[in-house]
Amino acid sequence: MSDAQTDDKTVDTEWVEFEYEPPSIATATIFGGSLVAIAALALSTLYMALGAGAGAAVVVAGVVKGRQKVVTLGSGVLFVALVGAGLSGSSPVAVVVTGAAMVVVFDAGRYAVQLGTQIGRSGTTTDAELRHIGLTVTVSALTAILGTVIFLVAPGQQPSGVVVLLLLAGVLFISALVLRDDVGDVV
Amino acid sequence: MSTTQHRTEQKERTELSDGENENETINQSPRVRHIASHSTGRWKVVGGGAILAAGVSILARVPALLLVCVMAVGMLTVRQLSSVPNPEVTVSRSLSPVDPDPGETVTVETTIKNVGERSLPDCRFIAGVPDELRVSNGTPRLATRLAPGEECTFSYDIKAEGGTHKFEDIYLILSDAVGATEHEYKLGVHQRLDCRRNPSPLQVPVLRSVTTPYAGRLSTEQPGEGLEFFAVREYRTGDPLKRIDWNQYASSKQLATLQFRTERSASVVILVDVRKDAYVRTDPEDNHVVERGIEAAGRALVTLLDEDHQVGLATLGPPFWLAPSDGTNHRNRALDALSCNPVFSSTPPDEEYPTRLRTLELLQRLTEPTQVIICTPLVDDRVELPLQMLESDGHEVTVLSPNPAEMDTRGGIVATLERQQRVSRIHGYGIPVIDWDTDTPLETTVAQTMHGWSK
């Protein structure tokens, strides 16, 4: 906000009222992540790229309005576009890049709404944002690279029973991670 | 850290904070109270999406979609490894200037230091601003991360208003590294901002007629020594020469004596209604109506002291008594009380106080006929009892009532009507009610009411 705007506001209202505003780094991350997802899908399937664009627009709308549910809905649209791209034969690299970008957009969107609601327009949030979004981007990128490498170098032919067991193990593992009790005991 | 250890530390911290006095700059380990914990649910959504993608991948035999699961596994594993640390912080808050005048800007600087051994990866602080004061610049909110030994500072400006203002607790939202879980705490940091009231005197009389034997400036209906003309009577032997009406003697050759109104000082007690029930406001943005009651009491106080009356202060609600007196010391004592005594705080008292008992105490203290000015918003029927008790005991009562702004809601309309009926009833007891609207200057209202009452 410029000085002139600050002065005008002070004169008009005499005091600073709380106003919702999503923090800048998280908002920039949402735009960046959305562009990456759209570009990765556009290389293989244009329709799904358009779908991802629509999802990203909904996420941005949710962040601007401060609605967590709208952000989740937009991310859901992004997810559908991602699955659609996978089904229509996109390359594994495009899928994994879009997946990583989608996770980042979803997390940054929800975090932006949370900070915007709790801290608002004039509060400082830079350190918290850098820490949180930096972690999400780093972990997503590393996982994406690791996953792609394993996918590309893994032997192609396995007995079908082994594949089913591995998938089952994978799903159970994810379930265990998801179903963890978040809150736990607090002293 | 074990639970017991942590609890013991919390107890020690509480004792430490209770022992602190309320200086302008405080640095203390706050009393930490856990309020709530909740999951943001963010990573459960991601996990659900991953499982869904795995299902679609298996059904459609598209191996590439399995990579979406891998993406989720990364973040979910990090979430599994992270936890919310316990907040171990010290808080330092400084006010500048320490002793502001009403309307002056006060800069409040709050520094929070992480004295624990674990890093606080995502902490958000929302400092409680005193209820009646508003932030004019900056913000009392901050989101940051704090490594062990690291500190963060946020400052904001508030516009000081007369009276005593309590700073509320600091609200802390502490999250783990990936934002899966949030714990909410309140950090109790006790501090007060005292802003000395500087009320301006009224230019109109606020008293009724009862007087004391002491010389003063209140004109009475008794002839005697004074400045204001009262009447002319026949000359009697022994009347001083300076009182003879020489104009009449010149025209009619008959001696007559001028009489003036006796001026006496009154003994007045200003009774301020600071009961819990009186702290009402029609808009969360507005001040409590008690604030206006205290303002009116302050203005009446300085007006009466300027006129050489003996003025005391008392309260309905939390007990306070300052016997009627005059002089500079008494004036300072009364204004200090109105400004800094917690009884006249901008926040409501925690307890209820029996109105009848408080009035009986006051009646025992009033040994001679005393005028009582009650500053009350008249928002409930219980305030009528002290009015009746005082008036029937021979003390002339005047009600100075700041009128809460009217509301358009049904409840607000009913409250307004009830208050109007209450005012009518009090008029019926023979007590004048100065009904002070938010839009009208106090002087105008006082002048209109007292003029109408004297007719």
Image: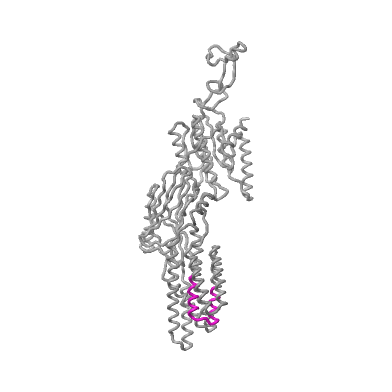
Location of residue A35 with respect to B364 vertically, above or below: below
Front residue of B262 and B201: B201
- x and y, in percent, of residue B351 in the image: 49, 47
Count of marks placed on residues? 0
The answer to whether residue B9 is visible is yes
- x and y, in percent, of residue B72 in the image: 47, 74
Name the residue rendered at 50%, 83% in the picture: B63
Location of residue A157 with respect to A45 vertically, above or below: below
State which region is magenta: A78-104
Front residue of B233 and A4: A4
Splitting the image into 4 quarters, where does residue B250 fall? top right
Front residue of A55 and A5: A5
Q: Quadrant of the N terminus of chain B?
A: bottom left
| Residue B442 magenta-highlighted | no
In this picture the colour scheme is: one colour
Our reading of the magenta stretch's main secondary structure is helix
| Residue A79 magenta-highlighted | yes
Location of residue A23 with respect to B209 vertically, above or below: below
Name the residue furthest top: B253
- x and y, in percent, of residue A35 in the image: 51, 72
Splitting the image into 4 quarters, where does residue B148 fall? bottom left
- x and y, in percent, of residue B372 in the image: 53, 34
Location of residue B325 with respect to A67 vertically, above or below: above
